[in-house]
Amino acid sequence: MPETDERVATVRSDGSTLLRFAALAAASLLGGGVALGAAAMLGGLDDGQLTTVVETAPVPVSTSSTPTEGLSVAEIYRRAGRGVVQVTTRGSDGGGLGSGFVVDGDGHIVTNYHVIDGAETIEVSFSNRDTLAATLVGSDPSSDIAVLEVDAGAAALTPLTLADSAKVQVGDPVVAIGNPFGLERTVTSGIVSALQRAVTAPNGFPIDQVIQTDAAINQGNSGGPLIDAHGQVIGVNSQIETGGSSSGNVGIGFAVPANTVKTVVRQLIENGSVEHAYVGVTLQEIDSSLAETLGLDIESGLLVQTVQPGSPAERAGLRGGDGETVIDGITVAKGGDILVSIDSVPVAVMGDLRAQLDKRAPGDRVRFGVLRNGERVTVTVTLGSQPSAAS
């Protein structure tokens, strides 16, 4: 198991949502499980790294419930708590604790990649204190998601249901269930405090459309679910912002959105791995303020900041910025192509592009509608496979 290392969560707090396809710098650390033994795994307690909470599917809710009012925290915990597990790992360099949750009756459990990274043995403990050996089905460092499997009968499992995270709104009440500092099945509550954040995955690539919450998340929560007021999982809690002064919760946590988790989990169960389509650009979302400042004739779209050498984007001729300007304290590359569509589907924000790329595979050819020097052009890109780590 590797030594604990620091990772950085990239978050834009000014509301302009800078989302990039390349590694981004920030002030928080990648969250992990609670360390056991002398050496901590990635995200371990020793270095005060960010706590990751398991993102589980929403718990099935009876049609007799009141969806407009939602469930109490106690009722959510009663329904979902049995589906949340503690994940214990052992490796050559030590061990760790994290969280996870059951997603189906076949014994599949979702947790964070960084919780099990480097593990030689994995055990899963349920609410009834039963502990079972778990096997790794597959993992995806690009989304910080892993799937485990245990040999347990369907009657012993309480699957949680993954919600449609696209419907989440700022201010929605949420509950996190996990094992902070090894304290089993601890529940905390709060609200969705922001959307469309970006954090850095273990391999250095960004995870976008991340949900920000003020529900208390600490080390050991990694891999646990963030649950909405109807008992549905809207994300897997993965990181916290520590403010650089502590390793504990300061009211800012981040969860990988359920829609991303659905896509990744399906591929991991089917194939054991995930292939991410890769373009090789960093992008800046355009809003009316940025458009006015840069003198652009468009108020939405994705401004190409940089093009990675040797990438599909470079081979296709996409162009990055040729100068820089500072807007509200943020350095923005200007003069690059502006992506406005992919295969005739408009892309106004990063989420639009990601949703389209998630439907495609490496080797697919896509047509980007581009605004270049005020003229509309089409650039055809043959998608590549995302590298194992960001350069």
Image (tube, rainbow, N blue to C red):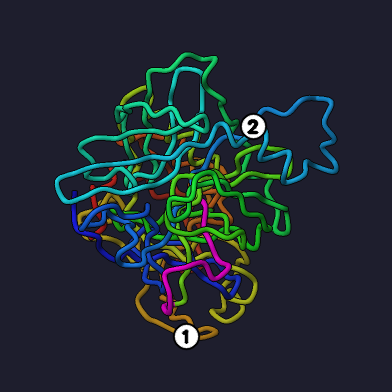
Q: Residue at x 55, y 84 (%)?
A: 328
**Span colored in magenta:** 244-255
User: Does the magenta run of residues contain 252?
Assistant: yes
Secondary structure at badge 2 equals loop
Q: CA distance from mark 2 to mark 1?
A: 45 Å
User: Which residue type does callout 2 highlight?
Assistant: Val
Give above or below for 340 relative to 287: above
Precedes in sequence: disc 2 or disc 1: 2
Q: Residues within 10 Å of mark 2 (few under 14, many from 20)?
A: many
Q: Position of residue 47 (x, y in %)?
A: 30, 67
Residue that carries the numbered disc 1 in the rendered image: 326
Q: Nearer the viewer, mark 2 or mark 1?
A: 2
Secondary structure at badge 1 equals strand
Residue 299 falls in image quadrant: bottom right
Give above or below for 256 relative to 59: below
Q: Position of residue 289 (x, y in %)?
A: 63, 76
146 left or right, relative to 345: left
215 left or right, relative to 154: right
292 left or right, relative to 305: right
Give above or below for 357 relative to 207: above
Q: Residue at x 63, y 37 (%)?
A: 163
Q: Residue at x 33, y 28 (%)?
A: 134
2 and 1 marks in contact (CB < 8 Å): no
User: Which residue type does callout 1 highlight?
Assistant: Val
Total residue callouts: 2
Residue that carries the numbered disc 2 in the rendered image: 59
